[in-house]
Amino acid sequence: MSLVKSSFKSSERMIIVCLLAPVLILFLFGYIVPLVNLIIKSFMNDSGWTIQQYVELASSKAFIWVAFKTVTLAAVVTVICLLVAYPLAYSISRSPRWLAILLLFLVTLPYLTSILIRSYAWIVLLSPNGVINRALMSWGITSEPIRMVFNATGVYIGMVQVQLPLMVFPLYAAIVKINRGLTRAAQSLGSPPSDAFLRVTLPLSMPGIMSGCTLVFLSCLGFYVTPALLGGVDDYLIAQSISTRVLVLGDFKAAAAQSTLLLAAVVVMFIIWRRRLAEELDEQSREMLSEKRGCDAIGLSLRSSLVERLATSLQVPYIRLHAIFSPVRLVVLALLSIFTVTLLVLPFVVVIPLAFSNASYLTFPPPSYSMRWFNSFFRNSDWIEALGFSLRMAGIASIISICVGLPAAFALVRNRFSGRLSIYLLLISPLIVPHVIMAVALFFTLSGTAMIGSSTAFGVAYATIGIPYTLVVFVAGLKRFDRNLERAAASLGAQYRTILRTVTLPLLLPTLVSAGLFSFIAGFDDVVFGLFLSGPGATPLPMRMWDNIRLEISPQIAVIAVLFLATLLVLGAIRQLVLFMHARPRVGPAELTRPV
């Protein structure tokens, strides 16, 4: 008996190894080895091991100031995103189904759209003769244009707009799970609606607040594109510092040291919040969080909140204040939600008409309309070659991500083994680790080889940043999968391969499409890897866009924005078609076994 159990466990371990081996091998050579090489390089000089680079950074007032500005930017953007996103997330959770779907689509659209396109749109919106300045002057708020771009103001506005979806999604996921009967119970006991929100809804949504703040803060620490395009000379952050030392100064050792310090900061925070980031996979942590939320909801928390203590000491004015605010709360909530949605979609309102402008320069609104910029795009071989390269590489990387991500998700969701949570955190860590660090590490590893400026380098890079998206989507899909369908097929004598082909994969088809879409966009929209890995025969479309925005700022980018949005609509239509076909009634086991 023990021999049988031992043989079964050995077979199970072999299956887990086979499922995880492809993704771990890819991560080993495309992610782990480059990062280790980067860290080693930061401790090396011509004479051997040294900490000289770190000593110089610690004594450099310029680097300390850059690091301080980076952390300050990340913290301020996180707070602003929380304040702006919470009303919208709350409104979505309380909206009718059709309106909630529409609002979630409007939140998702910017997340799926190129950061370069959105940054380009903000240059148009915030320029001295842009829409916002003209509106402020026409309303009499200002008498002359306000400088809002190529400075800190532009960076903060652009960063908040880019990071908002990362805050809205966790908040919505947390708020929608809250039992609305709890707030009604509080109101039935005499608590005004706004007071019930502070006492019940806000504390119970704290997991979403913490998750959203963690994602936004970590993402901001190493963000490169928006600060580089919308900021000025004084808005120099650590990601730009690393890039400048590699691409301009050729100071590789200092760049390695700065990258290692930024990586260490991100890894520390990643470890601290690992339970929150792996909540979808880690049932134990989710149960502990649910129990804590349940205790708080029924008043069993041992510590009273700050709101509770203030309410007790200032009971009368506190209740009067809520009585004044409660009647207008819905109006305030609606106005704040409209403001957030406007902030999310405003770049698209501007950039689409620009694609059809007849002007030879950037101006909004366009003086007249034509297809001249579309004709210019399709006649330019450089743009077409870059577009073809990006489509090819992003498509290949998406296929690789699905092929190695799906087996890994099966291994992680359907098996319990030592190190399971650690492997999951490793595989989703590229979502958190700044791409500038990964790109510099890959550049150092491949420098001096023929892979720099090759399709292979981009394939590995795009697959590495696409796998976390596919893994997260697959894990969520497998957690929701009803395994009774597989058991029913097995009870009818079907082999495992037959079950996988005829039951499991067809039911997971919508998940496969979603995973492929997200991983494709992750590679197609990337700029940072293009800065370090591009070559004469390997120049992705984002690099052409990057050069155009920095050197020319023509309506050509608006054409790409329209094509990008059209592609998204086509892919979205395909996904909806798959969902529709997937929802059609199927002949089940009962019908197959029913006598004729």
Image (tube, rainbow, N blue to C red):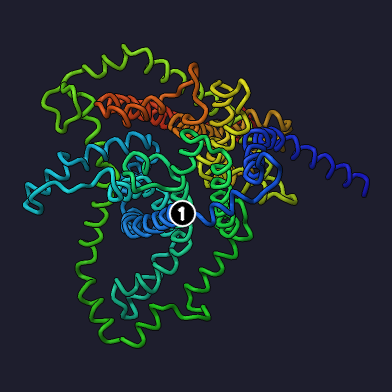
Q: Quadrant of the C terminus?
A: top right
Point 63% across, 32% down: residue? 445
Residue 276 horizontal/vertical position (percent) = 55, 57
Who's the residue at 16% across and 23% down the image? Answer: 359
The answer to whether 76 is drawn above or below residue 15 in the figure is below
At horizontal 38% and vertical 77% (from top left) the residue drawn is 307
Name the side, left or right, on which 243 lies relative to 146. Answer: right
Lateral position of residue 366 relative to residue 387, left or right: left
State the residue position of label 1: 67
Quadrant hosting residue 550: top left
The relative height of residue 373 versus residue 419 in the rendered view (above or below) is: above
- Report whether residue 7 is seen: yes
Above or below, comparing residue 441 to residue 535 in the picture: below
Q: Quadrant of residue 255?
A: top right
In x, y percent, where is residue 295?
Answer: 52, 73
Q: How many marks?
A: 1
How far across and how far down the image is residue 140, in percent? 6, 52
Pick out the residue farthest to the front: 47
Q: Is residue 41 left or right of residue 190?
A: right
Considering depth in this image, is 453 or 165 the residue closer to the camera?
A: 453
Residue type marked 1:
Ala
Task: Tell me which corner region of the image, top left, top right, bottom left or bottom right, holds residue 561.
Answer: top left
Tag 1 secondary structure: helix
Task: Evaluate whether residue 212 shows in this view.
Answer: no
Q: Residue at x 25, y 26 (%)?
A: 554
| Closer-to-camera residue (567/273) | 273
Vertical order, 16 against 268 (above or below): above
Q: Residues within 10 Å of mark 1 (few under 14, many from 20)?
A: many
Please provide percent x and percent y for residue 337: 27, 54
